Amino acid sequence: MFHRQFSQSAAPVHWNVQRKEAHALLRRLLDTPEDLIEHLRHNAASVIMNVTYGINISSKGDRYITIAEKALAVKYIPEWAPGAGFRRKAREWKKAVREMRDAPFETTMDAIKEGTASPSFVLNLFQELEAESKDCLKNNIEVVKGCAGMSYAGGTESTLSALSSFVLAIILYPEVQEKAQEELDHLLDHSRLPDFLDRDSLPYINAIVKEVLRWSPVAPLGLPHMASEDDEYNGYFIPAGTTVVGNTWAILHNPITFPNPSVFNPDRFLVPGKLKTSSDPSPLDPLSATFGYGRRICPGRYMAGAQLWISIACILAVFDIKCGVDEDGRPVRPHPTFTSGLIR
């Protein structure tokens, strides 16, 4: 189901929503730049809610964003997990997670029954299954609900993570911003905002997206896999049933593949004037490793890549991102620190 709705060929279907929300993000950043993280979270939630359920998110205090934030707080469970108090919280989280899955789905189903539903992941699957048979729809409705809930949970946090890392990188490496704006100004001549059809003409912006995903991978350890049969790798015997965790962080910070890996350097993906291709002496493309591995690679990677690109390109086209200042007006260079957990 994910593959059909979020494949590479289907990704352009979502461009209108992503473009509209990128422009809305610019307006919010202009009005209240101090609320940066809230604006990035709103942008991520708005896109995924619209694409998944056909629901428009109107404001920061939107019901669905509030529900999701409560449900996703489960990632902050303390390791010491106390007894009765923890069990009470676990019950609250379970309720919140179910509400995050059920509430927007029910809203979309009501709209489908009324004939007012906007195009969305849920509507498309509903129509496909109904076209097969009523039994097919009935037997798969819980699967559709689960897929929709997972796309929202996964898409919101991961996009927020990547865009937050982008802003931090630009503050720490101002020369990257200068080069990006030079490329944008040359193409756009200050006359319009960048659009998806400009991607091939903006190789440095493309390289920034790649470097954001390499420098600060959203999921440093990806998701666990399991060996389906006995295997051997470099002399190591791996029995069937072994849980295998791909160390995305180590792959993307390997100094042999990526010299000076802690440095944010989009140029590592470029040859003069263009992105490196498979025929060029090129480092491993991080867009593959950062989204997971094999059959369980992130099904929304094409949509996610497009959303990062349009957001980053638009932000750099209209804003200068700089360090904040202290009470004496001196720039305060931030110290880059990150949360731990599944999502960085």
Image (spheres, grey):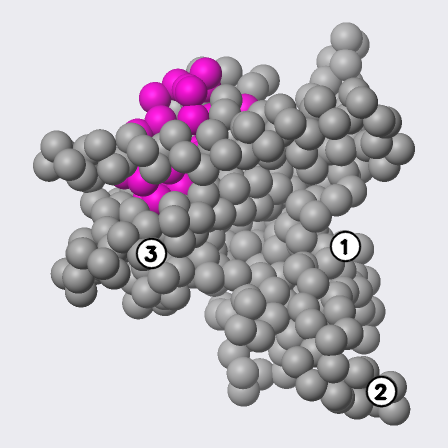
Amino acid tagged 2: Phe
What residue do we see at 84% from left, 31% from top?
81
* Residue closest to the far top: 327
Depth check, front residue: 78 or 203: 78
Amino acid tagged 1: Val
Depth check, front residue: 267 or 100: 100
Relative to residue 97, is residue 290 depicted above or below? Answer: below
Q: Quadrant of residue 90?
A: top right
Magenta: main secondary structure: helix
| 95 with respect to 148 (left or right) | right
Amino acid tagged 3: Asn
Q: Residues within 10 Å of mark 2 (few under 14, many from 20)?
A: few
Q: Residues within 10 Å of mark 1 (few under 14, many from 20)?
A: some
Circle nearer the N terminus (3, 1): 3
Which region is colored magenta? 37-65
Magenta segment includes 51: yes
**What residue did someone put label 3 on?**
140
User: Looking at the picture, how far across and down is residue 261, in whole percent?
Assistant: 78, 61
**What residue did someone put label 2 on?**
237
User: Looking at the picture, how far across and down is residue 5, in whole percent?
Assistant: 32, 59
